[in-house]
Amino acid sequence: MTATLTKKAGKGRTDGVVSELATYFTVKAGHEEELRAAVQRFVEELRRQDPAQTIKTGLRDTRHVIFDGGKRLLWATTFETEWDPYVDDAILTVGFEHFADWLQHTTEWDDLFAWVQEAGGMEALTDMEREDFAENVRNSTARLKKILQDGQEQAASYFNPLGPLTMPQVVKAQQVNDAFQEVLDNPAAEEALSHPALKPLLAQAAA
């Protein structure tokens, strides 16, 4: 069955605000260990990023799975923005060089490298100081998206328990909860918290 492309999820499925992407690559012979090191560097780079900037891209999670005796690679990620801006913003925020670090160990890299050359070379896609950097990335990613979708398989089914909520909503809820717990721990707040209007809030805190 052929997957229908949508503006929200591309070729993937959606649950609430969250969409899934699962793209399969072929690992170059003899490159398994280098690939393992590269995907670990990729995750470490994501951890170094400002969380607010990472959330801005729409990223919910990402993982790499090397399987079939080191011959195949699955890149699976979920996101809550639309497909086109998700890919663009990932390159703009994370940096294409961090994607190229692991992609170069796949046979699909040859096609990707041709796209890089057409886009003006690695400098055009990685030099964030260039005045035309953002515009160049957004104007040149159509082929990259096609390469990703050519290797993509739509999930047979998909469920995300936090699908109705965006990451900013989740983060805000945690911040509000932390602030409220701080109030609850303050003896000086006892009188104010006894007001009837705060009963629903206290009930939630006690649940």
Image (cartoon, rainbow, N blue to C red):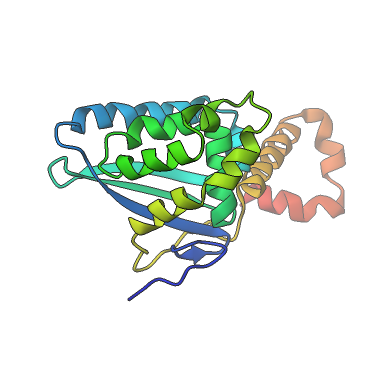
The quadrant in which the N terminus is found is bottom left
Vertical relation: 167 (above or below) 120: below
Residue at the limit of the structure toward the bottom, as seen here: 1
Q: Nearer the viewer, residue 207 or 156?
A: 156
Q: Where is residue 128 in the image (x, y as percent from the top left)?
A: 60, 27
Residue 201 visible, this orientation: yes
Relative side of 205 to 158, left or right: right
Relative side of 70 to 110, left or right: left
Vertical relation: 126 (above or below) 205: above
Q: Residue shown at 36%/64% (left/top)?
A: 155
Vertical relation: 150 (above or below) 59: below
Q: Nearer the viewer, residue 133 or 7?
A: 133
Q: Where is residue 113 in the image (x, y as percent from the top left)?
A: 37, 38
- In which quadrant of the rendered view does residue 130 lie? top right
**What is the total number of numbered labels drawn onto the structure image?**
0
Q: Residue shown at 37%/64% (left/top)?
A: 154
Q: Residue shown at 37%/54% (left/top)?
A: 22
Residue 43 visible, this orientation: no
Q: Residue shown at 27%/34% (left/top)?
A: 105
Q: Position of residue 91 (x, y in %)?
A: 53, 38
Q: Position of residue 90 (x, y in %)?
A: 53, 40
Relative side of 117 to 203, left or right: left
Residue at the limit of the structure toward the left, as seen here: 69
